[in-house]
Image (cartoon, rainbow, N blue to C red):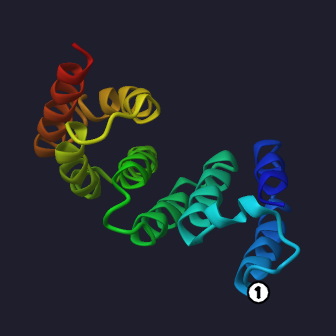
């Protein structure tokens, strides 16, 4: 149902949110004996991330920011790879809404993870976002942090 909700959102159908309500209801019911074995990976973090992506798909980046913040909050401290990726999506949503000063916090959290987590998916994602944070209309401190993060990412690619 989560994948169906995402597909609806990608197609521009706001009915995706009703389906997400059903997904959340099923999730809150807990795991049942007849559920597939792969349901172990479905958790609060994953659901919030999918809802954030749906918000982006439907042109609601401010609502996506809230969902991505929730996905990060729901990520256990030892789940560095997940934190790295979800911080990247939060940063992208913040860039879309022009929340320049807010964007500094996830970038500061991303910087130490660059050397700890190898994730091509996150590197590609950040490679698309960071140039948008290094233009003259962005405050200097945000721009400086984005440039520092870009340099670190390039260092890992060498």
The percent coordinates of residue 4 (x first, y second) are 85, 53
> Which quadrant is the N terminus positioned in?
bottom right
Secondary element type, mark 1: helix
Marks counted in the figure total 1
Quadrant containing the C terminus in the rendered view: top left
Q: Quadrant of residue 111?
A: top left
Residue 24 x %, y % = 73, 76
Horizontal relation, residue 66 to residue 52: left or right: left
Relative depth, front residue between 121 and 105: 121
Q: Is residue 23 left or right of residue 145?
A: right
Q: Identify residue for label 1.
A: 29
Q: Residue at x 46, y 49 (%)?
A: 93
Q: Does 58 sit left or right of 100 as displayed?
A: right
Q: Is residue 105 above or below residue 56?
A: below
Across and down, in percent, residue 46 comes to: 59, 61
Q: In which quadrant of the rendered view does residue 28 lie?
A: bottom right
Q: Position of residue 22 (x, y in %)?
A: 83, 75
- On screen, residue 144 above or below 60: above
The residue drawn where x is 48% and y is 60% is: 68
- Residue at 25% from the left image edge and 35% from the top image edge: 137
Badge 1: residue crowd in 10 Å (few <14, some 14–19, many ≥20): few
- In depth, the one of 90 and 135 nearer the eye is 90
Q: Is residue 68 above or below residue 124?
A: below
């Amino acid at each position: 149902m989560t994948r169906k909700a995402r597909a609806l959102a990608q197609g521009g159908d706001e009915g995706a949110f009703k389906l997400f309500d059903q997904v959340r209801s099923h999730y809150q019911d807990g795991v049942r004996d007849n559920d597939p074995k792969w349901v172990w990976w479905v958790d609060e973090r994953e659901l919030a991330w999918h809802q954030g992506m749906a918000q982006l798909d439907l042109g609601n980046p401010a609502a996506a920011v809230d969902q991505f913040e929730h996905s990060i909050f729901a990520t256990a401290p030892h789940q560095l790879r997940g934190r790295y990726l979800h911080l990247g999506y939060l940063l992208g949503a913040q860039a879309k809404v022009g929340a320049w000063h807010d964007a500094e916090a996830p970038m500061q959290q991303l910087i130490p993870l660059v050397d700890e987590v190898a994730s091509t998916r996150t590197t590609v994602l950040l490679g698309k976002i960071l140039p948008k944070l290094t233009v003259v209309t962005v405050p200097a401190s945000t721009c400086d942090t984005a440039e520092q993060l870009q340099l670190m990412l390039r260092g890992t690619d060498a």
